[in-house]
Image: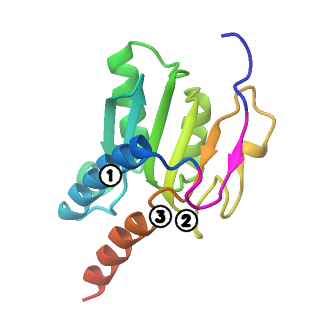
Amino acid sequence: MSGAIKWQWNFTKNCRVDIMDRKFMHEALKLAYEAAQAGEIPVGAVIVKDGEIIAEGKNMRETKQNALSHAEIEAINNACRKLGSWRLDECEIYVTLEPCPMCAGAIINSRIKTLIFGAYDQKSGSIDSVVNLCDYPYNHKVEVYGGICEDECLKVLQDFFKNLRN
């Protein structure tokens, strides 16, 4: 590896939103809807390399009865298997919800180049909302864009919890 990846924080709505960002976030949203249909908290993630989706994941904690089965972890595991490497340094991850501490750590440790997330998580978001784990001096810096397709990503979560309460 040739050195640290450029670190860029850009949490303004609609920054870096292009056709491909919308396309990949909508693919992650489809996975979030699938998770909701299975009774899971609706979070979806896709990993992209060279403009193609190479892996996906959705929240499966209830289905698998495993605390580690977050959408990001599922997607990272699938990408590592597909590429035959734990280093995902040429990849981007699109996730519908700001990652928690575990998932933020997995994104950093797998050397993912860019994180693009939808909704902010005021309760456990560990990229901006509660804490910023990417602010620490790790040997890898992730380029981060938040609030991409935020309204759609927030709606699937709100609808899920509204239905759960009724």
Q: Which three-letter amino acid code belongs to the residue tagged 3?
A: Glu
Residue bearing the label numbered 2:
121
Residue at image x 33%, y 68%? 156
Comparing 119 with 59, the one in front is: 119
Upstream in sequence: badge 1 or badge 2: 1
Q: Position of residue 151 (x, y in %)?
A: 43, 69
Disc 2, SS? loop
Residue 26, labelled with which disc? 1
Tell me whether the residue at label 3 lies in contact with that at label 1, contact meaning CB atoms closer than 8 angstroms: no
Residue 53, quarter of the rendered image: top left
Q: Main secondary structure of the magenta part?
A: loop
Residue at image x 47%, y 38%? 93
Q: Position of residue 7 (x, y in %)?
A: 73, 35
Instruction: Please tell me whether residue 24 is drawn above or below residue 52 in the rendered image.
Output: below
Residue 10, labelled with which disc? none
| Residue 144 visible, this orientation | yes
Upstream in sequence: badge 3 or badge 1: 1
Disc 1, SS? helix
Residue at image x 50%, y 56%? 148
> Few, some or many C-alpha atoms within 10 Å of disc 3 (few <14, some 14-19, many ≥20)?
some
Residue at image x 57%, y 35%? 114
Q: Position of residue 119 (x, y in %)?
A: 49, 63
Furthest residue in direction left, as rendered: 37
Classify residue 9 as left or right of residue 146.
Answer: right
Q: What segment is highlighted magenta in the picture?
A: 7-15
> Few, some or many C-alpha atoms within 10 Å of disc 2 (few <14, some 14-19, many ≥20)?
some
Number of on-image labels: 3
Instruction: Please tell me whether residue 97 is drawn above or below residue 94 in the rendered image.
Output: below
Upstream in sequence: badge 2 or badge 3: 2
Residue 150, labelled with which disc? 3
